Amino acid sequence: MNTLKAEKRSMDVKAKKLRREGYVTGNVFGREMKESVPVKIEKAIVDRLLKTCHKGSQVMLDIEGEKMNVLVKDVEFNPLKGQVDEIDFQALVSNEKVHSVAEIVLVGHEKDASGVLEQLLEEVQFKAYPSALVDKVEVDVSNMKVGDSIKVKDLTLSSDKDVDVMTDPETTVVTLQYVHNNVPDDDEDEAAAETAE
């Protein structure tokens, strides 16, 4: 598990000023916390973390020596500046299920050239205890045939008894469609037949 160093931040200092100084602002909240804790984290540390973690990832947050098992709950990206402005965390409690999301990652798709893969769902929402949290679900598409589709109910996450999937089980995750130039066109067949005559 990644450890992320953070400092408590004074609300007297505006978030905009901290961002100019190279920090990302954030908050830590949780059911067993009396109040949320505003934090600031060096931008370089957040950028490093987000190379391997994202929304739904579990990390160890070290706030001035106090370590907390947290979930990355929200990441606010500023597209104009190309940087993260805000990152929020939820403190985890071992016996409490939390809402989270897992990114859907397709694997094995380089093997099939007979069709076009269309991914219709990027992430799946679920509730789970901290011990059962995942931040990504791999979907093997190597055995898909043209016309096949995989639904949320087919995912490994859906069969995990420790996880309550919140996304509709009938939602299509990925389909394998015909490549248009592989589909025979009736007009072309007739034209070919006329040419042959």
Image: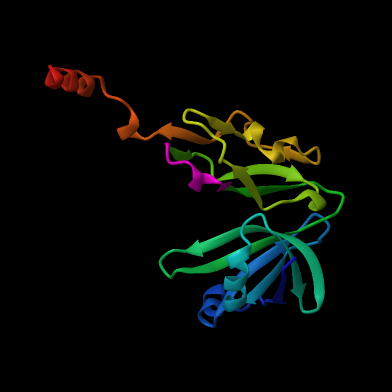
Residue 109 location, x and y as percent?
51, 45
Q: Is residue 132 left or right of residue 157?
A: right
Q: Residue furthest right?
A: 95
User: What residue do we see at 80% from left, 37% from top?
Assistant: 161
Which portion, as a residue range, is magenta? Answer: 106-114
Name the side, left or right, on which 159 lies relative to 77. right
Direction from residue 149 to residue 91 in the image, left or right? right
| In the foreground, 194 or 184 | 194
Q: Position of residue 47 (x, y in %)?
A: 57, 72
- Residue 29, above or below 169: below
Does the magenta segment cover residue 75?
A: no
Q: Tell me the residue at 15%/20% (across/down).
A: 196
Residue 68 visible from this viewpoint: yes
Which one is nearer the viewer's eye here, 191 or 45? 191
Residue 11 appears in the rendering:
no
Q: Position of residue 182 (x, y in %)?
A: 34, 32
Circle count: 0
Residue most extreme to the bottom: 21
As for residue 112 lying within the magenta part, the answer is yes
Residue at 74% of width from left, 35% of height from top?
Answer: 159
Percent position (x, y) of residue 95?
87, 49
Quadrant in which the N terminus appears: bottom right
Establish if 124 lies above or below 182: below
Q: Is residue 101 left or right of residue 109?
A: right
**Quadrant holding the C terminus:** top left
Say which of 85 and 127 sits in front.
127
Q: Quadrant of residue 24?
A: bottom right
**Based on the displayed image, in which of its 4 quarters is residue 122 positioned?**
top right
Quadrant of the rendered structure where residue 9 is? bottom right
Colour scheme of this structure image? rainbow
157 in relation to 132, above or below: above
